[in-house]
Image (tube, rainbow, N blue to C red):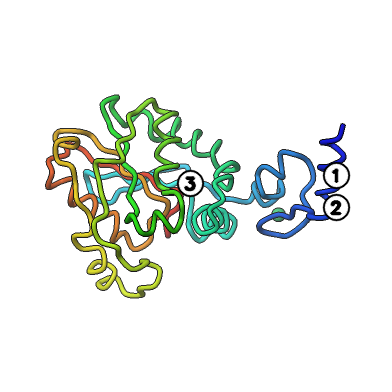
Amino acid sequence: MFKKTWDKCLDILFPQICLNCKTFLEGAENKNNLLCHDCLKSIAFFKTSFRLSPECRLFALGPYEDVVLKKLIHHFKYKSFRNALTPIEPFINIYLEDLVEGTLNSYCIVVPIPLHKTRLRERGFNQSLLIAEIIGEKLNLKVVPEALKRIKNTKHQTEIQDDIRRKKNVLNCFAIDEKSVRNKSVLLVDDVYTSGATINEAVKMFRHAGAKEINVFVLAKTR
Ligand SMILES: [Zn+2]
């Protein structure tokens, strides 16, 4: 009883609004989703996977140009609101069932793109690890964060405009634990794929370390 009254007081004092259209949110489900029903429904999730090369698939949940999806990812990544994953978690699960599950073998390991320890301290969590854990749990695959380590505290890729500089920025930024990836299938996980420089650098490392098969999963990719 007290909790209900308290929740109502909070609603009046700090009404929760949709992350996108700013209308007041009503009902527990919309509040948990951080979005109104219409905005959540508007996200144009992909129903397909992509290829980075003939032997490397890119699984992406939706287009990064989708304003609502982009706002959710920013909320999750830069404001450290882990609950920004709540509305898209069911869609991650559907995507995994429909497009990913059948293509990976049960020996595949899931490896999140790591943050440098300085950035990790600032942000408090690695967003890619949280996504990797959802995938590991859903597909019953082992998550191996220690396989890849970030040894260079690189500039934010978003601060760099041209592709050549982005490539240079992440060159040799990773160290790999060869024995945990040799002859393994790997699903590499990141939040977004834009210029591809970071992921391509990581893919290169896995290839050199003798990984048998490498695929990539991201929440969003640019068109
Ligand atoms: Zn809305």
Q: Amino acid at mark 1?
A: Lys
**How much space separates mark 3 and mark 1, taking CA atoms?**
38 Å
Query: Which residue is label 3 attached to?
Result: 46
Between marks 2 and 1, how big is the CA–CA gap?
Answer: 6 Å
Q: Name the residue rendered at 31%, 40% in the picture.
A: 145
Instruction: Determine the secondary structure under disc 1.
Output: helix
Quadrant containing the N terminus in the rendered view: top right
Q: Quadrant of residue 14?
A: bottom right
Q: Quadrant of the C terminus?
A: bottom left
Dot 1 surroundings within 10 Å: few (below 14), some, or many (20 or more)? few
Which numbered disc, 3 or 1, marks the residue closer to the eye? Answer: 1
Amino acid on which the number 2 mark rests in the picture? Ile
Left or right: 120 as drawn, with respect to 16: left
Sequence-wise first label, 3 or 1: 1
**Type of the residue with mark 3:** Phe
Q: Residues at badges 3 and 1 in contact (C-beta under 8 Å)?
A: no
Question: In the shown orientation, is residue 184 left or right of residue 191?
Answer: left
Residue tagged by mark 2? Answer: 12
SS at circle 2: helix
88 in relation to 97, above or below = below
Residue 8: which numbered mark, if any?
Answer: 1
Residue 66 in which image quadrant: bottom right
Residue at x 32% of width, y 56% of height? 116
For the residue carrying disc 3, how many other residues have a C-alpha within 10 Å: few (<14), some (14-19), or many (20+)?
A: some
Is the residue marked by circle 2 packed among few (<14), some (14-19), or many (20+) residues within 10 Å? Answer: few
Looking at the image, residue 62 lies above or below residue 182: below
How far apart in space, not on screen, are marks 3 and 2 (Cα)? 38 Å
